[in-house]
Amino acid sequence: MIKPWIFEFFAAPRDLDGHFDRQASQRYFDAYLDLWASAEPAGFEGIFFSEHHFGAAYSPAPNLLIANVASRTRTLRLGTLGMVPPYHAPWQLVEEIGMLDHLTGGRLEIGTAAGIPNEMAKVGLGHDEARARNDEALDILDAALKSPVISHRGKFWQFDNLRLTPRPVQQPAPPVWVTVVSTASARKAARRGAKLCTGFHPLGKIVEIFDAFRDEAAKIGRNVGPEDLCIRRQVILLKDDREVPAVLEMRRRETRKFLEADPRLETPDRPAILDTPTAHAFSVGDDEFIAGTSATIAEQIVGQCRLAGAGHFAATFDRARPPTVLKEWYAEYGADVIPHLRQAAV
């Protein structure tokens, strides 16, 4: 079975670029909250929100979105891919996790990401320091999920006998995810006991990343399988497969332009500006885009998941489409794609 998720970037509204209209902004939030609630009857497993800052998206605090969507749903699992620990006090993230697991009724998924270098640079946070903060914060998070009282002595945080409450509803802890773009980060996730999500790369590179995860897990005696792996891709629903070539070419151009500020991006005409042990380069492969009729999309998703051994698939739907159109896509995807995913053997 392939579990179907939504990966929500929640782009900032284009018509509010450069100015603020309170009523228009509120309508934008309301439309998306209504959209996300419709994912439950459509049959999705859950939604992963993302954390971005400084105008890139409308979700600098994705945990607030989770709390709101939780009140509108009953079975939909809700999480982040991911929270960016270098921006936060890790003890406070632990407390928020406990609260959110209560507010969702035990439907929380914990996801973290190391962060976007060009976003962090705006507040003077270099990639080496960001990685160090991320690693130390994850040590605290992992310890706090195991014990309600923790002490820590590190480079960035020092404390003794902190009691962090409330404890999560899901015991011993909610599922923990991490997003990665490299084999080194995949091996680290395997050692932590986390689940893994990746995207952007060509499928061959994703297989390499997943193989590194599986290999590292085997070394420490951890049993992992499809349930621990997720592929994230951009999905575009079309009425006619003849539209696919033109749509894919447009999406490739738009995505590479959107990501060109990220110094880790490699393109055919530009090597990654930033590729270090703490900030890994990535590329946008043709496999990143899945477009066509529902039947075509289902076939491609199942094919990629089977080759990679992934039991989860997270769809990023076209952020340029209005929520009213995306709601129709959710329903169509739920009726015509999700049944194939849930029946597929991986």
Image (cartoon, grey):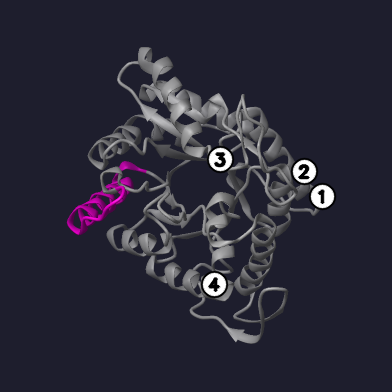
Q: Residue 94: which disc?
A: 4
Q: Residue at x 61, y 25 (%)?
A: 269
**Marks 3/1: CA distance?**
22 Å
Query: Label 3 is placed on what type of residue?
Result: Gly
Tell me which corner region of the image, top left, top right, bottom left or bottom right, holds residue 204: top right
In this figure, which residue is indicated by the disc labeled 3? 311
The answer to if 324 sits in the magenta stretch is: no
- Disc 1 is placed on an element classified as helix
Q: Which residues are magenta?
A: 17-43
Q: In the image, 125: left or right of 95?
A: right
**Marks 3/4: CA distance?**
27 Å
**Pointer 1 or 4: first along the chain:** 4
Camera sees residue 1 = no
- Badge 1 vs badge 2, beta-carbon distance below 8 Å: yes
The front one of 164 and 279 is: 279
Q: Residue 219: which disc?
A: 1
Q: Residue 215: which disc?
A: 2
